[in-house]
Image: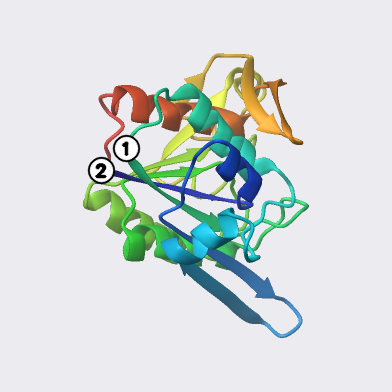
């Protein structure tokens, strides 16, 4: 069974419920800037089932829609939905903002504690202060066989620039990207079907959505030659 991880803005409980998707585990990482305290919460299957059913609230709810859109692409592209264990980490808020420290902590939880086999990172940061611990946890996971896919940016971003990560772009990005940006795979579709704002719709392709498309292809068809970096 494949362990699939998504680090993003969480997921809508209603989407999980309406599409018959269950979480095997989840976590939320946030930084209280005023107190300079990292707050972390993790949840197991029983707590997640109660939240999914609407019985109890958790701080995993996607208040932006980005994380739900990413999961919806995976779910739509891979039919039938495979036998996977799905893990979600929420680090982005309603404005799709997050802190690099939360990303490093989420990577540690996903890759070291959970030990996911495939990780989707439709996000990135230009801040390089935490590059060393980020590289350490990513390289360790890839060495054991994990595959990490990350959306590339128009400028160098982490973790996409790390050698052990497969960075993904879309056609629009490639029309403006500089030579200093690492892009390992390009999704050429110009649109994608996804769930956002309470409904399914066609949306313009972005590098974030392209990353999910690439992850879906791995679930559906297996890992292409050259993507394994360990």
Residue 1's disc is 2
Q: Can residue 184 be seen here?
A: no
Q: Nearer the viewer, residue 101 or 132?
A: 101
Q: Earlier in the sequence, mark 2 or mark 1?
A: 2
Task: Estimate how packed mark 1 is, as few (under 14), some (14 to 19) or many (20 or more) residues with alpha carbons within 10 Å.
Answer: few
Q: Residues within 10 Å of mark 2 (few under 14, many from 20)?
A: few
- Residue 151, located in which quarter of the rendered image? top right
Q: Are marks 2 and 1 in contact (CB under 8 Å)?
A: yes
| Cα distance in 3D space between marks 2 and 1 | 6 Å
Q: Position of residue 113 (x, y in %)?
A: 34, 66
- Its colouring scheme is rainbow
Residue at (40%, 30%) from the top-left corner? 81
Identify the secondary structure beneath mark 1.
loop
Residue 193 in the image: state x and y as whole percent: 62, 21
Q: Residue at x 51, y 60 (%)?
A: 48
Write down the residue under mark 1. Answer: 83
Q: Is residue 182 above or below residue 6?
A: above
């Amino acid at each position: 069974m494949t362990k699939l991880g998504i680090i993003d803005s969480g997921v809508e409980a209603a989407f999980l419920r309406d599409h018959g998707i269950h979480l095997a585990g989840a976590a939320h990482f946030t930084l209280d800037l005023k107190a300079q305290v990292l707050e972390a919460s993790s949840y197991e299957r029983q707590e997640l089932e109660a939240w999914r059913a609407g019985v109890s609230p958790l701080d995993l709810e996607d208040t932006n829609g980005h994380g739900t859109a990413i999961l919806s692409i995976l779910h739509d592209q891979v039919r039938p939905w495979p036998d996977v264990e799905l893990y979600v980490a929420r680090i982005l808020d309603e404005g799709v903002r997050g802190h690099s420290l939360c990303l490093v902590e989420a990577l540690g939880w996903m890759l070291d504690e959970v030990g996911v086999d495939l990780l989707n990172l439709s996000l990135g940061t230009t801040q390089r202060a935490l590059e060393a611990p980020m590289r350490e946890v990513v390289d360790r996971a890839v060495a054991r066989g994990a595959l990490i896919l990350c959306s590339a940016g128009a400028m160098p971003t982490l973790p996409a620039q790390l050698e052990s990560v497969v960075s993904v772009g879309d056609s629009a990005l490639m029309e403006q990207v500089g030579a200093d940006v690492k892009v390992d795979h390009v999704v050429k579709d110009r649109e994608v079907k996804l769930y956002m704002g309470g409904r399914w719709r066609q949306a313009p392709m972005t590098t974030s959505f392209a990353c999910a498309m690439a992850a879906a292809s791995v679930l559906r068809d297996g890992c292409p030659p050259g993507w394994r970096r360990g």
